[in-house]
Image: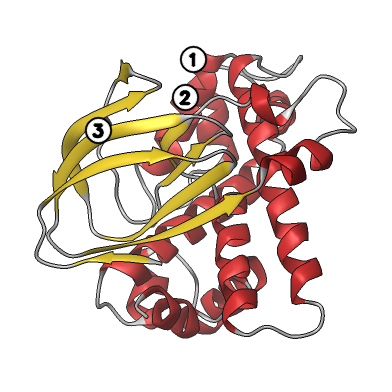
Amino acid sequence: MIKRTGLGRQETGISFPGHMFLMNLKGVASRGEDFIDGRRISFSPRRAGSIIHMPAGSDWTGWDEGDPTAAYLLVSIEKGFADEALGGMACHRSGDLPPSIGFRDTTVEMALQRIVIELKQPDRISVTMVESQAMQLLVQMVRLNGSHHEPAKGGLSSFDLRRAIAMIESSPDEIPSLAALAKEVGVSRFHFSRAFKQSTGMTPHAFIAQRRLDRSAEMLRSTNMSATEIALECGFGSSSHFTIAFKRAFGLSPIDFRRRCRI
């Protein structure tokens, strides 16, 4: 866990022989510069919940300015473990994964949070649990990078998928109907539902539910709103429904999740 207080600007200089995951828990990096292996890449503002993955051997430097108080979670994975974890995938090696800065993904966030829980409250099977979560992190990065570069056959085009997701995210407190989403991209409801799942691995309903949980987790980290207020803001029918769904996804109640993010 990394914390900073009273420091609006920070310099970045990280070079690690293994894989590194860094997640913003609190604070916003609003402007800056990023360099990977000496090559400048575009900078995107990073809010609470955004994740950075540096593959083994990458060199990340730069600077950012933003909130003077911030907290980060850093998890490193030895290259040997990563190579062994991905050894059964003929088309992937851990060294083939590209750097990713400022992305959001519920699966990666859940795995990182569960690693923290195991390390803070260890028992006899914590090592096995941590290794399983580390493996999930790596496999999910393979999936994310594979789906990003090559859309699944039979799925929506990249343009139509972006339009559908933009429509979903423009109204987080209201669920767009399947008919409205299908109309947005000009296809039938049946075709949209099938193509959307082919493109994302989730039904439209499951995707919307995941987006709501992502937003609720960010609000728990970055606001002082009550769990009930967040439940209503994110479109959950009741606080009890929100608590059940959140605990199923993150392994913690909303209150416990907020408490761990602010330790």
Q: Mark 3 points at which residue?
A: 62
In the displayed structure, 39 sits above or below 74; it is above
Mark 3: give few (<14), some (14-19) or many (20+) Cα within 10 Å: some
Where's residue 236, x and y in %?
Answer: 48, 69
Q: Name the residue under label 1.
A: 159
Residue 202 in view of the camera: no
The structure residue drawn at horizontal position 66% and vertical position 17%, both measured from the top left corner, is 151
Q: Do the residues labelled 2 and 1 touch (CB within 8 Å)?
A: yes
Q: What residue type is labelled 2?
A: Arg
- Distance of label 2 from label 3 (alpha carbons): 30 Å
Q: Quadrant of residue 234?
A: bottom left
Q: What element carries label 2?
A: helix
Q: Name the residue under label 2.
A: 162
- Distance of label 1 from label 3 (alpha carbons): 32 Å
The structure residue drawn at horizontal position 52% and vertical position 75%, both measured from the top left corner, is 242
The structure residue drawn at horizontal position 58% and vertical position 34%, both measured from the top left corner, is 56
